[in-house]
Image (cartoon, rainbow, N blue to C red):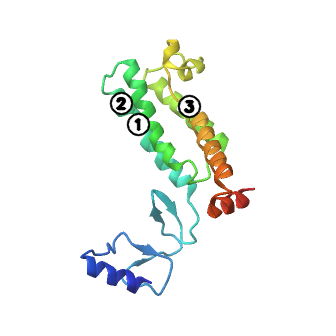
């Protein structure tokens, strides 16, 4: 199969980046071979040699990025309305991508929300940490309007499940996925 890919690349004028290519197969030439300690990143998800997702490392990397993103937004001197809109867009988009890709449990989403509240409190954006409900009530009710990652993940996963159930009669692949899930 790799010979076919190499042939295709030569026809269209592309070349394979052997520095970023890695495999757990021994017979593939010109690619780095994964040993037991190496990791492979595909679509932002780290995997080990056995194609097992390294969830702890991925979650740690996401948390670091969230912290940097929120700090950079707070330093922009946006007003409160625009700051929370920007946080919702810039921070939630990071987690939206991983919901469904890696198996994140409910308690982990709650820990993420807690960490975001802690960051906002430490940066003096939300000065009433005991009143966490004020953060999540919509802006039209004269409060902050931060989106909860717990609520967002539940909505996305529920929408995915209902879409599978609704379209399982028309699409065999979706029917198969639904059977595996149940």
Residue depicted at 55% across the width and 59% down the height: 54
- Per the image, label 1 sits on a secondary structure element best described as helix
Q: Quadrant of residue 55?
A: bottom right
* Image vertical order of residue 7 relative to residue 45, above or below: below
Between circles 2 and 1, the one closer to the viewer is: 1
Residue depicted at 53% across the width and 21% down the height: 135
Query: How far separated are the C-alphas under marks 2 and 1?
Result: 9 Å
- Per the image, label 2 sits on a secondary structure element best described as helix
Identify the residue position indicated by label 2 in the image: 73
Q: Are the residues tagged 2 and 1 within 8 Å (C-beta)? A: yes
Q: How many other residues sit within 10 Å of disc 2, few (<14), some (14-19) or many (≥20)?
A: some
Identify the residue position indicated by label 1 in the image: 90
N-terminal label among 1 and 3: 1
Between circles 3 and 2, the one closer to the viewer is: 3
Front residue of 41 and 92: 92
Q: Position of residue 147 (x, y in %)?
A: 52, 29
Q: How many other residues sit within 10 Å of disc 1, few (<14), some (14-19) or many (≥20)?
A: some
Q: Position of residue 72 (x, y in %)?
A: 34, 33
Identify the residue position indicated by label 3 in the image: 148
């Amino acid at each position: 199969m790799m010979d076919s890919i190499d042939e295709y690349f030569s026809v269209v004028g592309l070349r394979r980046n052997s520095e970023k290519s890695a495999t757990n197969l021994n017979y593939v030439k010109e690619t780095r071979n994964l040993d037991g300690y190496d990791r492979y990143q595909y679509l932002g998800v780290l995997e080990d040699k056995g194609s097992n997702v390294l969830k702890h490392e991925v979650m740690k990397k996401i948390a670091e990025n969230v912290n940097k993103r929120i700090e950079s937004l707070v330093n922009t001197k946006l007003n409160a309305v625009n700051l929370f809109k920007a946080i919702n867009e810039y921070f939630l988009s990071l987690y939206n991508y991983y919901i469904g890709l890696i198996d994140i449990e409910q308690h982990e989403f709650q820990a993420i929300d807690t960490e975001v509240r802690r960051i906002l409190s430490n940066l003096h954006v939300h000065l009433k940490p005991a009143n966490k409900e004020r953060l999540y009530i919509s802006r039209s009710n004269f409060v902050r309007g931060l989106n909860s990652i717990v609520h967002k993940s539940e909505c996305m996963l529920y929408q995915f499940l209902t879409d599978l159930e609704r379209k399982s009669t028309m699409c065999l692949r979706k029917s198969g996925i639904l059977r595996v899930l149940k």
